[in-house]
Amino acid sequence: LRHQRTDADGSPLRTKDIWFTERNDNIALSLKHAGDKLYEKKSPFQKVEIYDTYAYGNMLTLDGMVMTTEKDEYVYHEMISHIPSLTHPNPKRALVIGGGDGGTVRELLRHSSYDEVVMVEIDEAVVEASKEFLPSIASALDHPKLSLRIDDGIKYVKETKGEAFDIVIVDSTDPVGPGEGLFTETFYRDVHRILKKDGIMVTQSESPRFNVKVFKEIFDCYGSIYGKENVHTYLAHIPTYPTGMWSFSYCSKGQANPLTTIDEDRRTEFLANNKLSYYNKEVHTAAFALPNFVKDILGK
Ligand code: SAM
């Protein structure tokens, strides 16, 4: 909490009753915060803001929607990164679409097998704000193996030639604003094309409790591209996203199955060398266990 303001006596200013509220149709999430925003910018793409919340530390919002917070970011970033990186036998080149706060590339770059991670984020303001106010999340944004491009991920994927990546991670906003085109079949077909033959794509795929329509449409779309048997939905608990129940979709262009094709020796060594806060061997397996109502949505 580098930017935490203090009271006259130096104690943290934690008494104000000011609330940030993310409103979504019939539900809302509120977090009490310390008053003035730490950062606010209307970029050409969206409104970028950073708040100093009492419960979750500094928080990034885009157009009033929570993207990440210092205190629960590890769930999302570990789960979106380590499941594909540990399932692929030897990932060397990864592409991250979006992900401007830096959390996903920080986690990917824990894996020494990567020679290069390319990140294509449309909005420079997200990177700028995260570097200044979310330093623990943005800590790898200057990593020598990272090629950071400020560009539209849809365009980048369309223009990329050949089977260029082992892993593609779509760390996107919700399907509104600049992220809308990241939820289309055309984009997903381009991603499939640029994956190597044993490549893996993982996307954040919204909440099965809250955004049921998008959740189901994405699953069906991935099934039509990768084959249903190569699409695996998994879940994690993220307190600051609507309903707290969040999904990810794992799609394999080859046969890599996230539950059976793990190199246990490599995983054991990775986990011994990296102190993670959410991901472990048991969580990896359990995340793919879907409640009945989720199976019903997906027609499983
Ligand atoms: N973890 C968050 C969540 O699920 O709420 C999302 C993270 S946020 C960092 C997603 C990023 O995707 C934003 O920084 C946004 O600017 C970026 N983005 C949206 N549309 C994009 C596009 N077409 N190309 C590249 N990046 C995009």
Image (tube, helix red, strand yellow):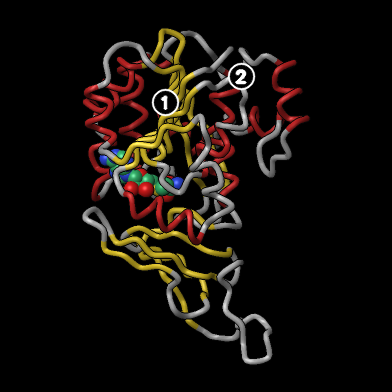
Secondary structure found at label 2: loop
**Residue 260 falls left or right of residue 30:** right
Relative to 262, is 43 above or below? below
Instruction: Please indicate, yes or no, whether residue 211 appears anywhere in the rendered image.
Output: no
Is 96 in front, or is 182? 96
Q: Where in the figure is residue 150, as x and y percent of width and height?
A: 31, 41
Query: In which image quadrant can residue 196 be found?
Result: top left
Residue at x 70%, y 22% (from the top left corner) = 267
Q: Amino acid at mark 2?
A: Leu
Q: Where in the figure is residue 11, as x and y percent of width and height?
A: 68, 84
Quarter of the N terminus within the rendering: bottom right
Relative to 269, is 155 above or below? below
Q: Where in the figure is residue 190, as x and y percent of width and height?
A: 27, 21
Ligand 1 image position (quadrant): top left
**Residue 87 falls left or right of residue 25:** right
Secondary structure found at label 1: strand
